[in-house]
Image (cartoon, rainbow, N blue to C red):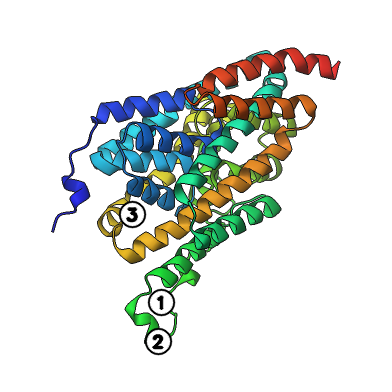
């Protein structure tokens, strides 16, 4: 029996989706929190290319699998109607613009001995980003959690845990999905035996798969960043400490200052925050290093998306799966909301940055069609003017 979703005629062409992802990768500021919000706003609400159910399935799958959240969701949305070709082209279109930007910045950084203006730009942009992602988190919460008390409890728990731990704990997403599944659509075997069928213990234990190997530098880069892409949950929020431990402490490829600058580059460029791996790879081994680092990071997330995607599409409408997805979605959005607070603690450092964030929220609240890149450009200008005066 064919899946109704597969027989459904899409309201857009493959190239329209590719152009959208290209534009989002070029102008989409704010990191994973904002980017997943933009996709919902543009593709579900405004253009109606993607159904809310398909979006939720994609968000759930992206949270279940390790790797960069926004990139995985973009790949899945490309898969919805155009399968592997759509997933591949959507993923490339989303990632490539920011990759070229960070490589260009990496070249300038190496050639001119650091980027002194970066701190000034980030001072303004970092604060504006908080306002952008706060509004995105608000919209996602209203749309996906609604007035459901169980989902609100999960949402609030994950938000609090994320704020306290400053990380996103993968097994809590699974547990939330299982809880809603058992309460709303319990399987028939539940009353007949124990809960051994709920095999949370079967989750792969994240360990060091690659020992110390005497290999070339590019191979070392590839192995390290493949681990980052394959085993780090939580996207941009969680991958930063992992990258720091490997590139600064373990391999000593970068200095502390270089690493901090790399993170700043990721924040002031559009697209996924994880694209900072391209900048880091460039500092380590030039363009080959940037290319290997980016490919190694994003290939696992691509595979983790397209391999299970057919099963999500086939079984996604079953009551048990819908309940499971609802639970994971509530947990994911709770973690996203918590991450807004975590990032805010690092970006809002004084009264001017607090004002920039508040003005951003007010503008986006008042002017629904205001484009975020305009706000980012204005905030960068404010940072370039204010930062030197405040630090003088």
Q: Residue at 42% of width from left, 43% of height from top?
A: 72
Is the residue 335 above or below the residue 350 in the image?
below
Corner quadrant of residue 302 = top left
Position of residue 22 measured from the top left corner of the image (x, y, whole percent): 39, 25
Reading the chain from its start, which is encountered first: label 1 or label 3? 1
Residues at discs 1 and 3 in contact (Cβ within 8 Å): no
Q: Nearer the viewer, mark 3 or mark 2?
A: 2
Q: Quadrant of the C terminus?
A: top right
Is the residue 164 above or below the residue 119 in the image?
below
Q: CA distance from mark 1 to mark 2?
A: 9 Å
> Mark 3: few, some, or many residues within 10 Å (few <14, many ≥20)?
few
To which residue does mark 3 refer?
Answer: 308
Is the residue 75 above or below the residue 42 in the image?
below
Q: Residue at 52% of width from left, 35% of height from top?
A: 34
Identity of the residue furthest to the left in this view: 1
Q: Is residue 168 shown left or right of residue 48?
A: right
Residues at discs 1 and 2 in contact (Cβ within 8 Å): yes
To which residue does mark 1 refer?
Answer: 197
Along the line of sight, the residue nearer the viewer: 369 or 333: 369
Element at badge 1? loop
Rendered image: mark on residue 101: none
Position of residue 65 measured from the top left corner of the image (x, y, whole percent): 45, 53
Q: Is residue 129 visible?
A: no
> Mark 1: few, some, or many residues within 10 Å (few <14, many ≥20)?
few
Element at badge 2? loop
Q: Nearer the viewer, mark 1 or mark 2?
A: 2
Corner quadrant of residue 78 = top left
To which residue does mark 2 refer?
Answer: 193
Position of residue 145 measured from the top left corner of the image (x, y, whole percent): 48, 52
């Amino acid at each position: 029996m064919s899946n109704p979703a597969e027989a459904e005629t899409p309201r857009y062409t493959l190239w329209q989706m590719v152009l959208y992802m290209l534009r989002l990768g070029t102008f989409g500021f704010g990191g994973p929190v904002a980017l997943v919000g933009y996709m919902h706003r543009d593709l579900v609400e405004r253009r109606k290319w993607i159904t809310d159910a398909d979006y939720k399935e994609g968000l759930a799958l992206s949270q279940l699998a390790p790797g960069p959240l926004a990139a995985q969701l973009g790949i899945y949305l490309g898969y919805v109607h155009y399968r592997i070709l759509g997933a591949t082209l959507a993923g490339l279109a989303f990632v490539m613009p920011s990759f070229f930007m960070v490589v260009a910045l990496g070249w300038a950084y190496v050639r001119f001995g650091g980027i002194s203006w970066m701190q000034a730009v980030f001072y303004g942009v970092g604060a504006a980003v908080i306002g952008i992602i706060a509004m995105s988190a608000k919209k996602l919460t209203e749309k996906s959690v609604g007035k459901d008390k169980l989902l609100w409890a999960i949402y609030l728990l994950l938000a609090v845990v994320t704020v306290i731990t400053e990380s996103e704990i993968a097994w809590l997403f699974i547990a939330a999905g299982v809880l809603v599944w058992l309460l709303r659509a319990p399987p028939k075997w539940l009353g007949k035996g124990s809960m051994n069928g709920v095999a949370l213990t079967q989750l792969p234990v994240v360990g060091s798969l690659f020992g110390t190997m005497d290999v070339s530098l590019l191979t070392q880069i590839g192995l390290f960043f493949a681990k980052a892409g394959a085993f780090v949950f939580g996207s941009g929020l969680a991958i930063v400490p992992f990258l720091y431990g490997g590139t600064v402490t373990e391999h000593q490829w970068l200095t502390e200052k270089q690493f901090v600058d790399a993170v700043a580059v990721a924040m002031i460029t559009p697209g996924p925050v994880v694209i900072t791996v391209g900048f880091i790879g460039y500092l380590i081994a030039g363009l080959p290093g940037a290319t290997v680092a980016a490919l190694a990071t994003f290939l696992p997330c691509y595979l983790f998306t397209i391999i299970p995607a057919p099963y999500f599409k086939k079984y996604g409408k079953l009551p048990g799966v819908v309940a499971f997805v609802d639970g994971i979605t509530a947990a994911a959005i709770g973690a996203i909301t918590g991450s807004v607070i975590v990032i805010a603690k690092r970006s809002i450092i004084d009264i001017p940055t607090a004002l920039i964030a508040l003005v951003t929220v007010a503008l986006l609240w008042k002017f629904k069609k205001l484009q975020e890149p305009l706000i980012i450009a204005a905030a960068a200008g404010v940072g370039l003017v204010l930062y030197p005066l405040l630090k003088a």
